[in-house]
Structure formats: C-alpha cells, structure tokens
Amino acid sequence: MDTDPNHLFKDTAVAFSYKSDGALKKANFIFSLVNHPAISSMATSFVKFALKLRLPVEGIIRRTAFDHFCGGISIEDSEKVVERIGAYGVGTILDYSVEGEDSEEAFDDTMEQVIRTIDKASASPHIPFSVFKPTGVGSFLLMEKVQRGDQLTEDEARAFGRIRERFRRICGHGYACGVPVLIDAEDWCIQETIDSLAGEMMATYNKERVVVFNTYQMYRTESLTNLRQAFEVARDNNYFFGAKLVRGAYMEKERERAARLGYPSPIHPNKEATDKAFNDALAFCVQHIDRVAVMCGSHNEYSNAYLTELMKKNGLGNDDKRVWFAQLYGMSDNISFNLARKGYNVAKYVPYGPVRSVMPYLFRRAEENTSVAGQSSRELRLIREEIRRRRNQRA
Ligand SMILES: Cc1cc2nc3c(=O)[nH]c(=O)nc-3n(C[C@H](O)[C@H](O)[C@H](O)COP(=O)(O)OP(=O)(O)OC[C@H]3O[C@@H](n4cnc5c(N)ncnc54)[C@H](O)[C@@H]3O)c2cc1C
C-alpha cells in the first residue's frame, strides 16, 4: 500500500492555490504566533481579558485569526469563502459556531440557523453537507441526566422531547432538501444520549440513502465496537449507515473527569491505539460500503492517504459519492486541496458567527495548534515553503 503522505500531500502550489500572497503572509504570522506556547498563551490571555473589558479588539481579531479560520459573521458573509474554495473543488460545511448559550430560546435559534444552512446548501453546488452540535440544540445537563438513566421531572421530560423534536426538524429538513446532515460528537457523558438520538434519525431518514451521519470519536476505547454494532442495527433494520470518523477533541478533559470522578478513562491509553482504531474504522466502513457512507474528519496525513489506498484496493473511484474527506478551514490545506485536485470528495468545516461568539472556537484552534505535537510546525513549514516557492518563481 502506498500510504506515504509525501506522494499525495506535498504540493504546496496546489495546497495554497486559493490564497493570495497577502493571505499567505497572514497565515505565516498566525501560525508563527501560535507555534510558541508562551506567546500563544500570552496572546490568548490578553484577548480574553480585552474582550471581558469590552476593549475594541474585535476588528483586529476579525482581520487576523477570524479571517483565517472562519467564513464570516453570517451565512451571507461566508459566501466569498464558499466560492473561493469551491472553485478548486473543495466544498464548504457551514458550521454555526456560537457556543455557550443555554436557553430554550437559544436552542431554537440555533436550530433555525442550521435549517438556514440546509436551505443555503440545497441552493449551492459547493455546500455538500450541513452540520450541528447537539449541545447547540439542547441542554448538556439534561442529556447527561438521560444518559445516567435518572428519573426526569415532567418539565425535563418535556424539554427532552423538544431536543428530539429539534433533531427531527433539522434531519427532516435535510432529508426534504437532499442535504446530508452531520451530527457532531461531544463529551463522553452525553454521547450515549446523542448516539441514541442519532440512531433514531438514521432509522427514519436513511431508508433510501445516507442523510444522517453520526460521529465516532476513535480515541474512545469502545468506539470501534459501537461503530460495528450501530452498523449491524442499521443493516438488520434495513437503513443505510452514515459515519463521520474523528479521533476526538476532548481528550484532556475526558481523562481529567474520569480521574476526578473515579471511573476508568474512556480514552485509549496512547496515540498509537487511537490511530489504530481510527484506521481500522476506515477499513471497516470501506469494507461495508454497500450500506455505508463515510467521512474521514482528520488532519492526519497517514489516515487520509490510507483511505485513498483502501478505496483503490476495493475498486472505488476517487469520486465515489459514499466517501468523503474533511478538514477544518484554515488547516491542512495540503491535504484538502491535493485530494480535491485528484478528484476525491473533499469539504472543509467553515465556522461562522459573530466574532465574539466564535472566540471559544478560535481559542481551541490556538490551543490545538500549540499543543498537538508537530501539527503547527507542519502548517508553518508548508506555508513558508509556499512563500519561498512563489518568491523564487518571480525571481
Ligand atoms: C472535519 C472535522 C470534524 C470534526 N468533528 C469533530 C466532532 O464532531 N467531535 C470531536 O470530538 N472532534 C471533532 N473533530 C476534531 C478531531 O476529533 C480531532 O481532535 C482533530 O481532528 C485532531 O485529530 P486528527 O485526526 O486530525 O490528527 P492527529 O494529530 O493525528 O491526532 C490528534 C488526536 O489524536 C488523539 N490523541 C492524541 N494523543 C493521544 C494520546 N496520548 N492517547 C490517545 N489519543 C491521543 C486525540 O484525539 C487528538 O486530538 C473534527 C475534526 C475535523 C477535521
């Protein structure tokens, strides 16, 4: 198997084709900053402090990190990005990234926003999916209580009914408009509740094709078993199975919670075990592709290359509609744009929302690019390589 990422993802001219010289310089500045743990932590502390004091920093954030990692402050404002990357065969997944709101009104508003992204997707050739985060449309504490199997009060039972109804409205609208819906995965202590709702949605809307995709976090020791079982339930009940595979975003938090509350950590003991589970899950999905659609949500070069090899080995064309690659906007363009150039189905999560509301998302990107070994230096190396290449070409 040729899974050497150097053969697939090394072309920086392709990777950054959609970026002007100015945008590339901005990317160089941002990744140079977050690459240094001390500077990154100082900058994020300063921004948090300034936002709290309501100092006028939104403009500068908007022109730097926001511009690099987000589409815009609204769906309409994100159109430029949709068109720009769409011109290179890279789709957009509009991701309404307002976080931390916790009221019935906010849950309804988020649901309406997601429905608007579905409408937008159904009218655009460049938006192949919609997405939502379960805690955007329902209370974390209530989902946790349901998972624990606690007795719900009448009010809570009604509130949980409204969560189910919001899932139904979103997935039903996706079904009616022919736009697939990705359900993001979140914390371990609410994920069983999410899995169960996602299963209900798949059973309802995936009868003819995959509309609903649930997300599997392969850093969890039980995910491969869960994935296999969910597939079997789908097969036995005659509906199609949609799986978005990710490694998982909340490792430190999960380990800390397990240690604090005294239960075994649900996370694999090391990165190698997570990597193996992720790649085994890709192989499982491709092996059962007759009943499955799969999205590889990853910035890991080996896993993306491995999926291309699995496709080849199983006789699937590069553009097989059931296999998708996805990365976050502003990261791993070398993977996204090189895959798209070779005809694979690729999309980027493009977050949008008011600058202030998107800040938690941006802080996570800063943290991730500082703490994930090698990640930021890879981005930085590629960006600098492309700046150099363009300079030499002009000389
Ligand atoms: C399109 C897309 C959608 C996403 N959606 C979600 C989502 O719905 N829910 C969600 O939780 N995350 C989501 N993520 C984030 C994802 O889970 C990862 O955090 C992120 O992509 C980094 O993993 P990687 O495969 O890209 O790369 P890599 O850099 O190869 O892997 C890093 C990941 O490996 C795991 N890991 C690292 N060290 C260890 C260790 N010592 N032991 C065990 N495991 C370890 C962690 O999961 C870590 O995030 C999404 C990512 C993308 C690109």
Image (cartoon, rainbow, N blue to C red):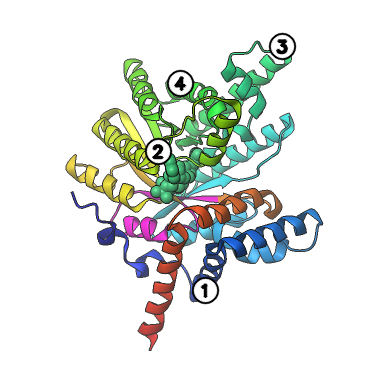
What amino acid type should be assigned to the residue bearing mark 4?
A: Thr
Instruction: Look at the numbered disc 4 and give the secondary structure of its residue.
Output: helix
Which circle's residue, 3 or 1, is located before the other in the chain?
A: 1
Which circle's residue, 3 or 2, is located before the other in the chain?
A: 3
Residue 311, image quadrant: top left
Q: Is residue 318 visible?
A: no
What amino acid type should be assigned to the residue bearing mark 1?
A: Lys
Q: Determine whether 328 is above or below 267 in the image.
A: below
Instruction: Look at the numbered disc 1 and give the secondary structure of its residue.
Output: helix
The residues bearing labels 1 and 2 have C-alpha atoms spaced at a distance of 32 Å
Q: Is mark 3 within 8 Å of ligand 1?
A: no
Residue 106 pos. (x, y %)? 71, 35
Which mark, residue 154? 3
The residues bearing labels 1 and 4 have C-alpha atoms spaced at a distance of 48 Å
What amino acid type should be assigned to the residue bearing mark 2?
A: Leu
Direction from residue 253 to residue 1 in the image, left or right? left
